Amino acid sequence: MAPRLKLRDITFFERPVQFARPFRFGAITINATTQLFVRVEIEVEGRGSAVGASAELLVPKWFDKRPEFSPAQTVDGLRRSLEIARGLYLARTGFLTAFDLHAACIGAQIATCAKKNIPALAAAYGLAEIDKAILDALLRGVETGFFDGMAGNVAGIDARLSPDLKDAEIAAFLSSRKPLPRVAIRHTVGLDDTVEGKGGVADAHENAGASYFKLKLSGDPAADAARLARIGKELDTLGRSYKVTLDANEQYADLAALQALMDRLDHDSDLRPIASRLLYVEQPMPRDITRQSPLGSLAARGFIIDEADDSYDAFPAARALGYHGISSKSCKGLYKSIVSATRAAKWSGGGEKFFVTGEDLTCQAGLAVQQDLALGAFLGVTHAERNGHHYVDGFGDTPAAEAAAFAAAHPDLYADAGQGIRLSIHDGDLLTGSLHAAGFATSVHPDWSALRPLEQPTSLQEQLA
């Protein structure tokens, strides 16, 4: 039986993050944003107290892309989501399993956020970050690591939020996991990134020896095709085999525009380097249009949802439309990732291939990248987009002593090659050995005294008034 816990406190902190280069995806370019840190205190029944932590960027214009809201307003929506979730979680005063807490609060979280004009994907962020910190505390309290703890279902995950599954199917999936010892990085090529020459996609200093590449799309079939042809020409100079994925971040207006790009991939010889190595296409159309648009013959290409993954029902609904995959991001919810992977494994038993991918919302060095990497390695995701190390200079504005503590505790993940402590990539891979430590994939926590309290949100309605 899963251990039960009682929440004592949830505290939010933040730290500014300055990007080393602009990151353009979808309709926004990010040069800086804020990193959230969550600290929770719990009492584990019969074992005493424990402290857990999580971290994630507050990314503007991703969780909520509605044009009437500014980037700052969408970040404010994430802050509001966190505060609402905190209140709901702390209102549960008895001993519960970690998943009991999540399941008891998710309905009220989505409903309360909706009343405040916060969409479901942003509402899920508040739960996701608290859940990660609670799991970290729980694992520390029972003195076990993430991989062993999750294989034994330490969180008590069941099928109450996914009635198409059985409790036993989730438990069997968890117990069958053999975490990967290494995960290949998938190097992101943003829309403003250099293509040719020094600093380009084939520059080993930039791509860190990656054999997987994630190429952002703009939503303009002609412009995207021309840029993909340039990228393919450069990647063909690598001298090693490679694979690519495409990510439109909801920029393709409809199926007709998407079909136009796919036709070019099918018939343009200049696009053969990309088309012949394409694994899947990620979230091509806006989430609302996605839900109304069966892919039809396009489904053979292998499409996945990302931003449209805003509920436990999203993957089955996408499957009915022709999608075969879904992204795992700990900022959308680690429990939902586990349910999605259980579904993919079950559905693949019928002959068709369904899969979960590892996508990165600029997870930063330290807690964020370690916890997301561990989740993917546990689920068996062999390659994952890892763009935090690329767009931010190492640990960024993290105090030197804190960065050094993470490097000392996780020497297989970080190294200082003379330019400060950075993510250490081994022949294009990240190693997961040190993530087996007690807790959620981390032996150390941030320097809480070096963080400032999370800025208080105001409602989006007040900002628009």
Image: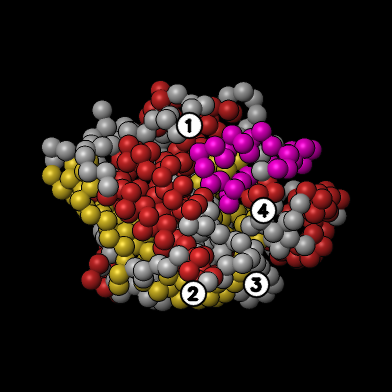
Q: Earlier in the sequence, mark 3 or mark 1?
A: 1
Residue 316 belongs to the span the image colors magenta: yes
Could you say which quadrant of the image residue 415 lies in? bottom left
Cα–Cα span, label 4 and label 1? 24 Å
Cα–Cα span, label 2 and label 1? 37 Å
Which of the pair 414/24 is nearer the observer? Answer: 24
Q: What quarter of the picture does the N terminus occupy?
A: top left
Residue corresponding to mark 3: 192
Q: Position of residue 66 (x, y in %)?
A: 61, 62
What amino acid does circle 1 point to? Ser
Q: Position of residue 158 (x, y in %)?
A: 39, 30
Residue corresponding to mark 1: 162
Q: Secondary structure at mark 1?
A: loop
Q: Residue at x 74, y 56 (%)?
A: 253
**Proximity of marks 4 and 1: CB atoms separated by less than 8 Å:** no
Q: Secondary structure at mark 3?
A: loop
Q: Earlier in the sequence, mark 2 or mark 3?
A: 2
For disc 4, the neighbor class at 10 Å (few under 14, some 14 to 19, many from 20) is: some
| Residue 47: mark in rendering | none
Which of the pair 4/261 is nearer the observer? Answer: 4
Which of the pair 132/367 is nearer the observer? Answer: 132
Q: Is residue 88 left or right of residue 81?
A: left
Q: Position of residue 45 (x, y in %)?
A: 16, 38
Could you say which quadrant of the image residue 322 lies in? top right
- Residue range of the region highlighted in magenta in the rendering: 292-321
